[in-house]
Each structure stands twice: as C-alpha cells, then as structure tokens.
Image (cartoon, rainbow, N blue to C red):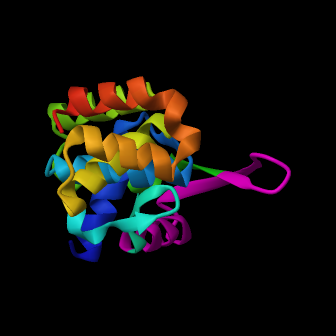
Amino acid sequence: MNSNSALAGLLQLVAASGGLVSTRIRIQKEAFLLALKGCLNFRAENFSYHHFGPFSRQLSETLKFAVSAGLLEEKEEAFSETTQRYSYYITESARKFLEEVNAIPNEVLNYVTAMNKEHWRSLELAATVAYLGRTKGLSREAAFTAAKELKPDTVPYAEEAKKVLQTLAI
C-alpha cells in the first residue's frame, strides 16, 4: 500500500464513519478488519501484533500526516487519570480530496456502519481473533481462547466480537 492509497483509505474510513472516529484503537482495528475483506487499500500484511491487537505503523504514520496536512482534525480528551483518547474529524480539505477518489463502495459503508455500532473492545477482540487465526493458523475457537488469554479485559465483549466477525464474514 503506497502512501497515497493509505491516505485515501484512512480518509474514506473516517468519512464512512460519518466524519468522526473516536480512538486510534478503533481506526487500527477497523482498518485491519477491512484489510481482511480487501477493502479501502488496507493490507493485512502491514499489521503486526501490538498490545491492543493488530497494529500498522504505516497507518499510524498516515494518521499523523493527515492531521499535520489539515485533512483530519485531532481532538484530545482525558480517558482516565493517566491516558488520553484521541478523536478524528474529517475536514473540508479532506472532503475535497475524497471527491477526486473513487466513491466509497456500499459494502464498505455497511461494514463500517456495523463496526461503529460495537464497543472498541469488541473490535479489539474481533481483530485479535482474526489476526491470530490468520498468522498462527488457529481455528476460530482456539483463536478466541488465545485472544481472551492475551486480553482479559475483552472477555465481556466476546459475543459482540463474534457478531462482528460474523457480520463481516471473516
């Protein structure tokens, strides 16, 4: 994925989310799940395992570039006493950029709409399960078991994570 297609994919993801994506974790997990579907120029091989599941340094760098270029607006808020949460809003400059890119396919809009209904922890678990299945060759059940051991905070979201994977047919 070259930097222009990564940028277009990121902006299309935020646009498909109604112009706002809350948390970097959500962006990373949605992008990974879309990569598994072959959507928005995201590539699953650009993701490696990180604390919150599949993570793409390239996507992280593209996000920073989009903010510095004025294509996305970043808002920071306190998430807890020790952590911050970042939300990203599409700007008018990004809308103009996207006018030159192909329209977002309805299938992608449906996927993003479905993912946006779920808690980010559900996406974290779903993406981790899919990642472990893909990279370790684990069955769905074994991947869920491994993911829940790696990420005990996601255990209450297991049913929602299964729903995400089923909805996306991953």
Residue 61: percent from the left, percent from the top?
A: 45, 74
Q: Quadrant of residue 49?
A: bottom left
Residue 4: percent from the left, percent from the top?
A: 26, 71
Image quadrant holding the C terminus, namely top left
Q: Residue 19 or 132: which is nearer the viewer? A: 132
Q: In the picture provided, is 63 more to the left or to the right than 48?
A: right
Q: Residue 98 or 27: which is nearer the viewer? A: 27
Residue 63: percent from the left, percent from the top?
A: 46, 65
Residue occupying image coordinates x 45% and y 28%: 118
Residue occupying image coordinates x 30% and y 46%: 143
Height in image: 68 above or below 164? below
Q: In the picture provided, is 72 more to the left or to the right than 128?
A: right
Image quadrant holding the N terminus, namely bottom left
**Is residue 11 visible to the viewer in this orientation of the structure?**
yes
Please give the range of residues in magenta: 58-85
Residue occupying image coordinates x 53% and y 28%: 156
Residue 26: percent from the left, percent from the top?
A: 47, 46
Q: Furthest-right residue in view?
A: 81
